[in-house]
Amino acid sequence: MKKLDSYLSDIDLIRLRRAKELSEVKSCFASSSDRLPYQVNTKAVIVLAYSHWEGFYNDCIDVYLSFLRDSGRTVSNTQWSMLAGIVSTELDRIRDRNHSPQARLEFVQTLSVLMASDFSGFQASIVLARSNLDFAKLKQNYQILGFDLAKFQPKRIRIDKELVGWRHQVAHGDNPDLSLADSKCHIKFTQDLILALADQFQEAIVSIY
């Protein structure tokens, strides 16, 4: 297992790279008045900002799960709700067999084995962003991870309306009302969210190490 500082540094390095890229976006595209047709500059900022928000979240998941796998800890002794990433395959098997009594019995019989599982078989997809990291998805993932959502509660409206909502509209060819959009503020908001994510994942690693 790597030293604690190595996992923390992995997150810091990724965050700093993304923060620098966002700063370059601000320099290249952000302006107080987007005079290009169809507000192309502002739309570019919105799409790039969201990509860094989702991308960094997934980066943190990768580092965190790598740390948990390396630790050799069992899932049930780390965070009970993370068992969702262990039993998902077995639950799918029950569904595929039409929830038959035999399938349910076999699931119960495998529970003792699943309860002792480490993170080597954890299904990362259950806590990844999956191209829609709005507040509801973040909340669901945080419930599985056992993280406190308090830092993001005051920002939930801006996350859904501006960071995610505008991006979805632009990506699908719509023309959202961006008359009040401030590209510099949008990038600063994204950088602050990324910093909050970094702090939270690093705190979780430190608390377990």
Image: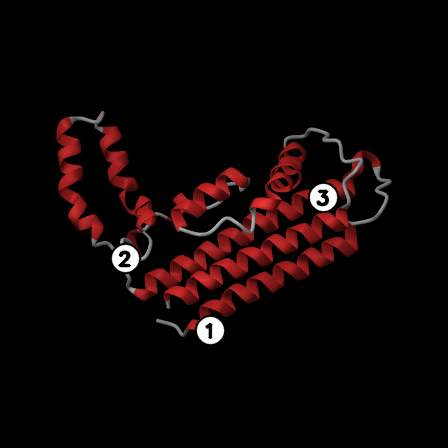
Q: Secondary structure at mark 1?
A: helix
Q: Earlier in the sequence, mark 2 or mark 3?
A: 3
- Mark 2 and mark 1 residues within 8 Å of each other at the beta carbon: no
Residue at the disc numbered 2: 77
- Foreground mark, 2 or 1, reads 2
- Of the 4 image quadrants, the one containing the N terminus is bottom left
2 vs 158, left or right, is left
- Foreground mark, 2 or 3, reads 2
Amino acid under disc 2: Asn
Q: CA distance from mark 2 to mark 3?
A: 44 Å
Q: Earlier in the sequence, mark 2 or mark 1?
A: 1
Quarter of the figure with residue 166? top right
Does residue 132 show up? Answer: no
Q: Earlier in the sequence, mark 1 or mark 3?
A: 1
- Foreground mark, 1 or 3, reads 1
Look at 48% across and 42% down and name the residue there. Answer: 139
Location of residue 157 with respect to 121 vertically, above or below = above
Q: CA distance from mark 1 to mark 3?
A: 35 Å
Q: Secondary structure at mark 3?
A: helix
> Percent x, y for residue 156?
59, 41
Location of residue 12 with respect to 141 vertically, above or below = below
Location of residue 90 with respect to 66 vertically, above or below = above
Count residues near mark 3 (Cα–Cα under 10 Å), then give few for <14, some for 14-19, many for 20+.
some
Residue at the disc numbered 1: 5
Look at 72% across and 31% down and name the residue there. Answer: 176
Comparing 57 with 196, the one in front is 196
Residue at the disc numbered 3: 44
- Of the 4 image quadrants, the one containing the C terminus is bottom left
Does residue 33 show up? Answer: yes
